[in-house]
Image: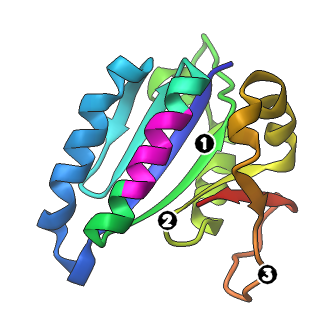
Amino acid sequence: MQLLALLRFEPPDHDPAAITPAIAGFAERLPPAGGRLLDHGPDQVLAVLDDPHAGFELLSRTLDGARRSGFGIFGGLVQPVQTRGELGVAPGGITERTMETLVEIAAAAGRNQIAITSRLLSTIELTVPVFARRFKPQAANGTRQVTRVRSLLVME
């Protein structure tokens, strides 16, 4: 099972330089965890995780590091849909619809949360059940953006 991850890093005290080492560290740990970086910006990364078990371990360690270091991570995960034609808009031939869904899910995540859909949870339960237990329904705190995706779960 392949996963597409979008992570946005929020610096402590609004100091953008503070997250540079965190982003570089995540990108460095991707290949050993069976992943690859598709794109990145000053405060976010787009990555493919080819090994779900190692990928979830990396995401868990990254969330733990964020809490310890005082910066925030807002993320989303989807199963990528790729195209071989000219329809792909993202690096790696990811379809526009996949990217729209991923951005929407990541935007709905709270601080130090990685959000997924209930549909993806079913797949995770079959492939890496130990990590499926880490996902809980997103609390209704009134700040969640309106999305096409009705049911989100988050890993904190």
Side of 62 where 133 appears, left or right: right
Label 1, on which residue? 99
The amino acid pointed to by label 1 is: Met
Disc 1 is placed on an element classified as helix
58 within the magenta span? yes
In-image side of 100 versus 140 (left or right): left
Q: Are marks 2 and 3 in contact (CB under 8 Å)?
A: no
Image coords of residue 153 (percent x, y): 76, 57
Q: Residue beneath label 3, please?
A: 140
> Label 3 neighbourhood size at 10 Å, few (<14), some (14-19), many (20+)?
few
Label 2: how many Cα within 10 Å (few below 14, some 14–19, many 20+): many
| Tag 2: amino acid | Asn
Q: Residues within 10 Å of mark 1 (few under 14, many from 20)?
A: some
Image mark for residue 39: none
Q: Quadrant of residue 61?
A: top left
Q: Which residues are magenta?
A: 56-64
54 up-or-down from 98: above or below: above
Query: For this rendering, which residue is in front, 69 or 103?
Result: 69
N-terminal-most mark, 2 or 3: 2
Protein image colouring: rainbow
Q: Residue at x 58, y 57 (%)?
A: 106
Q: Position of residue 21 (x, y in %)?
A: 16, 51
The residue wearing badge 2 is 112
Between disc 3 and disc 1, the foreground one is 3
What whole-number distance in Å separates the C-alpha atoms at marks 3 and 1? 24 Å
Looking at the image, is mark 2 or mark 1 earlier in the sequence?
A: 1
